[in-house]
Amino acid sequence: MSTRTQHEASSSSKRWMHDVFLSFRGEDTRNGFTGHLCMTLKEAGVNVFIDNQLRRGEEITAELVQAIRGSRISVVIFSKRYADSSWCLQELVEIMECRRRLGQIVLPVFYDVDPSHVRKQTSASFAQAFQKHEECFHEDTDKVARWRAALTEASNLSGWDLKNTANGHEAQFIRRIIGEITKQLDTTYLNVAVYQVGIDSRVNEINSLDGGSYDVQMVGIWGMGGMGKTSVAKAIYNKFYHSFEYKSFLANVRETAKESNGMTNLQEKLLSDIFKPTKMEVGDVHRGINLIKEKLRSRAVLVIIDDVDDVDQLNALAIARDSFGRGSKIFITTRDRHLLEQVEVNIIYLARKMKEEEALELFSWHAFRNPCPNEEYSELTRSVLGYCGGLPLALEVLGSFLFKRSLRDWTSTLKKLEKIPRFEIQEKLKISFDALSDEDEREIFLDISCFFIGMERNYVTRILDGCGFFAEIGISVLLQRCLVTVDEKNKLVMHDLLRDMGREIVRAKFPNHPGRCSRLWCQEDAIGVLTDKSGTEEIEGLALNLLRPDKANFNMKAFKKMKSLRLLQLNRVQLTGEYKHLSEKLRWICWRGFPLKFIPKKALNQLRSLVSIDLRYSNLRRFCEHSMVYYHNLNQAIDCSFEFYA
């Protein structure tokens, strides 16, 4: 599918700006038939786009093209002199393109002109018009050919001929047109997205999955926040809209469930959607469950339950195969894989991040209103895409923010994002963190986001267990909620924006006092705290990774007040002074490039609670200054990684 076609998604998932676009030759019908039709449509509550300017020239404007593409229905009013206007013919070509690519409805109206004259272009007025066009555009015969083809295609569509409808009575003629248009508009599609890049392909992927021979198909769409799960769910609803007599889309279930009577409101909406226009009241949740089962057990329904974060929400909506009739399709979107397993869905689809070309197109539509970036912004665009990491939410937020901003603004924004992520993105992602009910799970997430990304899962589990966390189950929960993933080498992986979200949670508590933050990972902050010895008892972890041993030496006294320090990473860092200042709570030390030839005895006395020590690429000649006996005084379960050099 081409770039343009991906943007112009199918009509089943299009967010329309207008109900009807009127195409006509102004000199022929503006002040008569078209004017009356437009006024009557508006009185019927139809959102009409009409171009009120008299046009000259050959090329239609970008604004007009956007209006055509943003309309659910195009009504083309063919009059005797319609073909005289190259402007009208260009409009018609675009309209017929929208019909093919968007599924837009095109309704032709033949006003005082025979449909066959439009189809064949052989009558006096149409033949004369094309004779002139062929003379004017003799160097671009393809353009004239496209105009002819568009006229032929449009005239073959079902429409209205004034001479043969309502006995030529214009008022009755308009009334019939209004009736058909309002009937066509009676379908209520959901707004999916302004620019629907990549959504159709994901809908097709889900639709192609084989869930086995179940009478009721239950599908879970699972993934981290901002991945576009809701947009895909809306597109699925639109896709199957006409296939089901009974359907319901329950949006924002997580938020609605928090409200007073939230679950009964959701139950009532489900039943009222199915049995509209009848409004149904359930009274209480337990009665609602029984009522849903009783009413829907024999009906094939389409139900979308969006943004669920607790299995009780699904239970309250009676989400189980035996609650719905044969042929039903139930779709659930969530950040928690475990609840999908609890209700035994037969398909779990992991929402994937955007491919590079998809990300580029989506961002470009928001930032430039084009499918590709402006040339002078191409380098900066690549940097933004690297930051977004294929997350649709981030691409949309940043693209919209950077729209029509200068190169200097782009550069400044990127620098700021390195330190402080965009609030709108973080708030959306933080929902998953806030949903963690267990304090251990939150602490584990923050430790991983600040220190352990890219490290082997079992290795990190042992360290965090040593910190008093139940890391095995904690990491499993993070995996189920898409806050962490594990690669093929069993290493912990986290989306960059989730990593930034975790770090921002830490930083935001004391934004101007890094010495009071629970974790220090930013090189600038760590150097500052070690230099001015401003660390406090609140610091639990510190990481400083230098590319090479720096001239700056830090003194061990900088650790004197860090009594809660559990995790310490000091790669290629030079320290002087007494090791007695290290915290006795240390569980992990990673000090690659350790500068000494042996570990001082006083340091070992401080490190009795260590779970892991990594001193690779160091100057060690032997483990400690006297004998290896001190090694045995350490925790017997310790992981040791170091090398001795003769």
Image: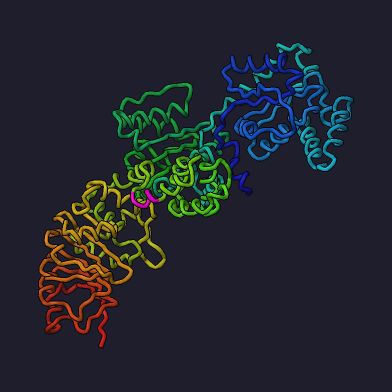
In the rendered image, residue 384, in percent from the top left (x then y), is placed at: 46, 51
- The main secondary structure of the magenta stretch is helix
Left or right of residue 248: residue 448: left
Find out whether residue 499 is within the magenta segment: no
Q: Is residue 267 visible?
A: yes
Q: Does residue 164 sit above or below 64 in this rendering?
A: above
Residue visible at 82% across and 31% down in the picture: 119
Which image quadrant: the C terminus? Answer: bottom left
- Does residue 160 appear to the left or right of 373 in the view shown? right
Q: Residue furthest bottom?
A: 646
**Coloring basis for residues:** rainbow
Question: Closer to the camera, 313 or 392?
Answer: 392
Quadrant assignment, res 583? bottom left
Residue drawn at (22%, 81%) of the image: 620
Q: Position of residue 133 (x, y in %)?
A: 83, 34
Q: Nearer the viewer, residue 487 or 89?
A: 89
Picture quadrant where residue 121 is located: top right
For residue 132, side relative to residue 624 (left or right) = right
Judged left or right of residue 336, residue 50 is right
Residue 407: x and y, percent? 48, 47
Q: Is residue 416 magenta?
A: yes
The magenta segment is: 415-419
Decide: is 308 above or below 387: above
Give residue 109's position: percent from left, percent from top. 74, 23
